[in-house]
Amino acid sequence: MLLSSVVRRDPRWLLLALNALLATTAGLLLPTALAAAVDAALGGRLDGGTVLWLVGLAGVELVGDAIGVVLAASITARGAAWLRRRLTAHLLAIGHPARFEAGDAVSRVTGDSAIAGGVAVLAVNLGVSVLTAGGAVVALALLDWRLAAVFLLSVPLAALLVRSHLRLTAEDVATYQEVSGELSARLVDAVGGLRTIAASGRADQEAERVLRPLPRLSGAGAGMWRTQARMIWRAGLLLPAVELTVLVAAGFGVVAGRLSVGDVLAALGYAALGMAVVGQATVLTALQRARASAARLAEVLDAPVPTTTPPGPAPPGEVSLRGVCVPDALHDVDLTVPAGAFVAVVGRSGAGKSALAAVIGGLAEPSAGEVRRGGSVGYAFERPALVGTTVADAVRYGTSADDGAVEAACRAAQVHDVVVRLPSGYATPVPDAPMSGGEAQRLGLARAFVRDPAVLVLDDATASLDVVTENAVETAVETALPGRTRVVVTHRAATARRADLVVWLDEGRVRATGAHHELWGDDGYRAVFG
């Protein structure tokens, strides 16, 4: 089980438990120490040793609580980091697109991992609460067995209350986690298509689509709060009732001479400690959230990794696809990209262009069919993520290119003049290098150029460039990477016109291939650029 693996891999929870046990022991001894101090004060026998013992116990409890907070934060962070590494590695092994959409995957990697990573701390807290309750019952019995018997009458009610809380929160918590992931997926999808949404004038409709799961999220959240509120007010009624019952029993004990006034105070303290589990409504809810999060993580980790043997390589520079399918994106695609050709991939939004580019570039494995590539692949995106300490590092990322190769790639991508104007040129830290969308795209192109690939895949990587700059970049590509195969996802008719071959996608299928002027006579093809 995933949660037990989280607990086992970090033995520091034992240190947390030991610290909590010491603090709990001090807390259990505190009411007795207070009772002794009160009796001594009433009898005029109070001395420094009694006071010092009382203060020492309080100090141990306070210091233990402080150490527990630090340990709990560290254990939770380490558990979350371990889960995130496992989840990320498995998502990369599964490939993309997969059954887990980008926003949903991000929600699982960030939110669910953080929640499930704290399960050891939650388990220790609940365990300490149970031990505290048991210790309180023993302490009551040592004071007077009648007090323990009276207190034990409340245990079935407390157990029923806890069981009811866990049962009622389970479904709401699972729904809340699931809908949160769905919202994240829709939001990421909308952000990725902002330009298309704005251009089509469908902002209101898209906002309504993204926010459609909100009522379910609200319902689940309200259900959790209602259940927790019910638990709190019932516990709030049960605790005073138990204390009152124990107080009455202790009063009879005082009258009978079995108990002192200090013992009555101790009995009240132990009654409150004995009900500690019932007061852990937030911890119980957090435990349910951890279980729901672990289920969502296990769903990803249990997803099978493609085990098909990769086909042999294609001739240098050639890419061949046979019967390629990607769930919800591509359907039975057959395509050959000739070596050295300039191929434009066009189609309406959602036609599967980016999925095709990802398969050609090796960023996604098809669920069916085979892909053969002839040589290394360079990839550039519409919104490149610039990873690295400096601008030069971001361009050479993943390669051992020297400064000369980095500068040559930036010149080819028409971004050298932008870089040299930065405060420290190529040594400028990436966070200190503000760039427009087009400038960032050109740096992404430079990163692809510096790899000297046999096949260059540009997934809308020039969308933010003006036509003049795009033409200059294309000329530079032909000069810097002569004879290389280029696959360009584009929305521009001018780019398709310059291509040797156009691949027209429609609803995940290749509707037609050919030269731009040959396809232009089709009304549906012209509508792609409308």
Image: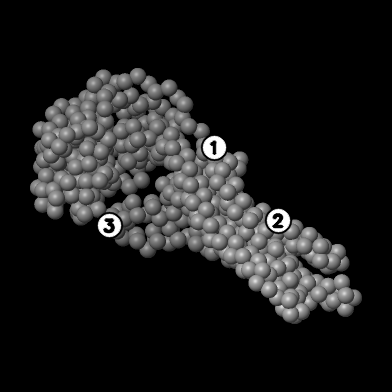
Secondary structure found at label 3: helix
In the image, residue 428 lies at what x, y percent? 18, 49
What's the residue type where badge 3 is placed? Ala
**Marks 3 and 1, the one that precedes in the sequence:** 3
What's the residue type where badge 1 is placed? Asp
Q: Which of the two residues, 56 or 386, is positioned nearer the viewer here?
A: 56
**Marks 1 and 2, the one that precedes in the sequence:** 2
What's the residue type where badge 2 is placed? Leu
Q: Which of the two residues, 164 or 485, is positioned nearer the viewer here?
A: 164
The tag on residue 131 is 2
In the image, residue 393 lies at what x, y percent? 22, 41
Secondary structure found at label 1: loop
- Above or below, 366 relative to 184: above
The residue that appears at 62% across and 51% down in the rendered structure is 18
Tag nearer the camera, 3 or 1:
1
Res. 147 image quadrant? bottom right
Tag nearer the camera, 2 or 3:
2
Q: Which of the two residues, 97 or 143, is positioned nearer the viewer here?
A: 143
The residue that appears at 26% across and 24% down in the rendered structure is 375
Residue at which label 1 appears: 302
- Above or below, 315 relative to 411: above
User: Gap between marks 1 and 2, in whole Å?
Assistant: 36 Å
The residue that appears at 32% across and 41% down in the rendered structure is 354
Q: Are marks 2 and 3 in contact (CB under 8 Å)?
A: no
Colour scheme in use: one colour
The tag on residue 199 is 3
The residue that appears at 24% across and 33% down in the rendered structure is 399
Q: Does any portion of residue 63 appear in the rendered image?
A: yes
User: Gap between marks 3 and 1, in whole Å?
Assistant: 40 Å
User: Gap between marks 2 and 3, in whole Å?
Assistant: 63 Å
Q: Are marks 1 and 2 in contact (CB under 8 Å)?
A: no
